[in-house]
Each structure stands twice: as C-alpha cells, then as structure tokens.
C-alpha cells in the first residue's frame, strides 16, 4: 500500500526511508514541497511565504486533537509539557511529623535516630534513655525549615526511541 502524502509513521531504522523526512522540525521551501505545504500549512512553523516546518517529534509523545473529558483542548500543532519539573510545596504528599519527649535529663547535644527530646541539661537537649517517652501535643503553629535543593527532576515516562518520519512523496489524501 502506497503511503499518503503527510502520513507519519514510526520506523526502527537509523535513517529516513526514501520519500520520507524525519519529523525533526526542519524548515522546507514551499516552492519545492507545495503539495505537502497544502496539507500542513504553518501548523508546525515556518513563515508561510517561503517556508513551512515539519512536525518536531524529538522528545515528544503524540496526542490526538480535541478535548478529553476534564482535559484541556489540544489543537493541531500544540506543544505542551515539560521535560523537567520542580515540585512546589502544595504538590508534596500530605504528611505529619510526630515528636516524643521524656522528662529524663538530656545527655547529648547531637540529634539522631536513637535519641529524643529530654529535659534541658546544660547545653544538651537530647537523651538516649528512651524510657518514659510520651507523645507531644504540638501547637498549631507553623515551623519552617528549608528542605531539599529545589532542583528540577526529569519528567520522562518509560520510553523506547524510534524514528518518526513524514511522507513527502505519496498519494494525496482525499477528505471523506
């Protein structure tokens, strides 16, 4: 079956087959590829006078046009999403931090996994004697401390790289 002009296919090759271009956002002259321009226009870029652009599928996932239930409207040629994301505090899962303390005298100034708050004794605040621990009722006030490095993280779903190509020499599609 002969491909349609403007058809996009996936190929496992290290090259674009004959009559196909990579979907890499390249600008093409309208004068040389007027039939393909008639189908794509400037949907993917170009000035519409002398050039038009091929779709750029590098590091992209295709999405069908239209609006799914509760989703934004995706128009042809829309680029959306981010390769990296920095989470904000409201995006973190809700969680609590519990505290425990004892009335026993503190015997160390170094916090750790096996010590809890003790009764202040000189310059020490923590105790390794964990007998008589009780939960603390913490006031409903906010205590703030810096956490993390506020660095973006990769936002990439599991993927397999293949080659998206668009046919530039094929059967002109008819509208149904």
Image: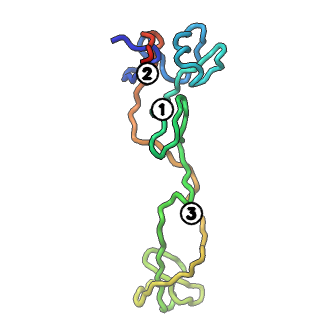
- Name the residue located 59 percent from the left edge and 89 percent from the top edge: 122
Up the image or down, 56 lies above or below 70; here it is: above
Quadrant where the C terminus sits is top left
Q: Which residue is mark 3?
A: 147
Res. 157 image quadrant: top left
Q: Secondary structure at mark 3?
A: loop
Q: Nearer the viewer, residue 6 or 139?
A: 6
User: Residue 172, percent across and down?
Assistant: 45, 11
The numbered mark at residue 65 is: 1
Q: Secondary structure at mark 2?
A: strand
Say whether marks 1 and 2 touch (CB < 8 Å): no
Mark pair 3, 1: CA separation = 40 Å
- Name the residue located 55 percent from the left edge and 23 percent from the top edge: 25
Up the image or down, 38 lies above or below 85; here it is: above
The numbered mark at residue 8 is: 2
Q: Secondary structure at mark 1?
A: loop
- Name the residue located 60 percent from the left edge and 11 percent from the top edge: 30
| Label 3 vs 1, first from the N-terminus | 1
């Amino acid at each position: 079956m002969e491909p349609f002009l403007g058809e996009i296919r996936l190929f496992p090759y290290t090259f674009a087959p004959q009559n196909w271009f990579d979907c890499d956002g390249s600008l093409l002259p309208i004068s040389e590829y007027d039939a393909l321009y008639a189908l794509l226009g400037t949907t993917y870029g170009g000035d519409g006078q002398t050039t038009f652009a091929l779709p750029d599928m590098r590091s992209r996932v295709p999405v069908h046009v239209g609006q799914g239930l509760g989703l934004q409207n995706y128009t042809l040629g829309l680029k959306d999403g981010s390769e990296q994301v920095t989470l904000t505090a409201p995006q973190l899962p809700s969680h609590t931090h519990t505290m425990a303390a004892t009335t026993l005298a503190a015997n160390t100034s170094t916090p750790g996994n096996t010590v809890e708050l003790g009764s202040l004794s000189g310059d020490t605040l923590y105790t390794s004697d964990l007998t008589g621990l009780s939960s603390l009722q913490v006031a409903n006030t906010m205590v703030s401390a810096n956490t993390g490095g506020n660095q973006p993280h990769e936002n990439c779903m599991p993927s397999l790289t293949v080659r998206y190509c668009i046919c530039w020499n094929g059967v002109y599609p008819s509208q149904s």
